[in-house]
Image: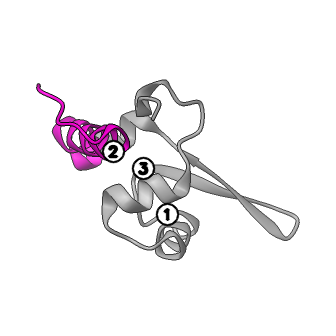
């Protein structure tokens, strides 16, 4: 898995997993400006979403993001990553 801070676009399922939300709840929170981690823009009949790594980091804490990344890397490799 690529490090979150290097991603141009952080996929909504990853952010939902970090926050412990469903993807639909995350979408609604962004559409209603209830989550201070990014924004949703409506273009014709569809929404486009942008998650800011910095805002996400400020909202959940850098340690939470590092723990998530380490957990996913461990799951992918089947080994424990030391810090």
Q: Which quadrant of the figure has residue 9?
A: top right
Please, what secondary structure does the residue beneath circle 2 have?
helix
Residue at (55%, 68%) from the top-left corner?
Answer: 27
Q: Nearer the N terminus, badge 3 or badge 2?
A: 3
The furthest residue to the front: 78
Q: Which residue is mark 1?
A: 33
Q: Which residue is mark 3?
A: 37
Q: Most prominent secondary structure in the magenta stretch?
A: helix
Query: In what quadrant of the picture does the C terminus appear?
Result: top left
Query: In what quadrant of the picture does the N terminus appear?
Result: top left
Given residues 9 and 34, the one toward you in this image is 9
35 on left or right of 67 = right
Rendered location of residue 71, percent (x, y): 25, 45
Q: Callout 2 environment at 10 Å: few (<14), some (14 to 19), or many (20+)?
A: few
In this rendering, is residue 30 above or below 59?
below
Number of the front mark, 1 or 3: 3
Q: Which residue is mark 2?
A: 72
Please, what secondary structure does the residue beneath circle 3 have?
loop
Q: CA distance from mark 3 to mark 2?
A: 21 Å
Residue at (48%, 39%) from the top-left corner?
Answer: 52
Given residues 51 and 15, the one toward you in this image is 15
Residue at (24%, 49%) from the top-left corner?
Answer: 60
Q: Callout 3 environment at 10 Å: few (<14), some (14 to 19), or many (20+)?
A: many
69 magenta-colored: yes
Q: CA distance from mark 2 to mark 1?
A: 28 Å
């Amino acid at each position: 898995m690529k490090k979150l801070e290097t991603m141009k676009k952080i996929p909504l399922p990853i952010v939902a997993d970090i926050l412990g939300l469903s993807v639909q709840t995350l979408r609604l929170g962004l559409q209603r400006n209830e989550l201070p981690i990014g924004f949703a823009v409506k273009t014709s009949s569809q929404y486009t979403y942008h998650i800011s790594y910095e805002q996400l980091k400020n909202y959940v804490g850098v340690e939470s993001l590092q723990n998530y990344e380490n957990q996913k890397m461990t799951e992918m490799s089947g080994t424990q990553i030391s810090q």
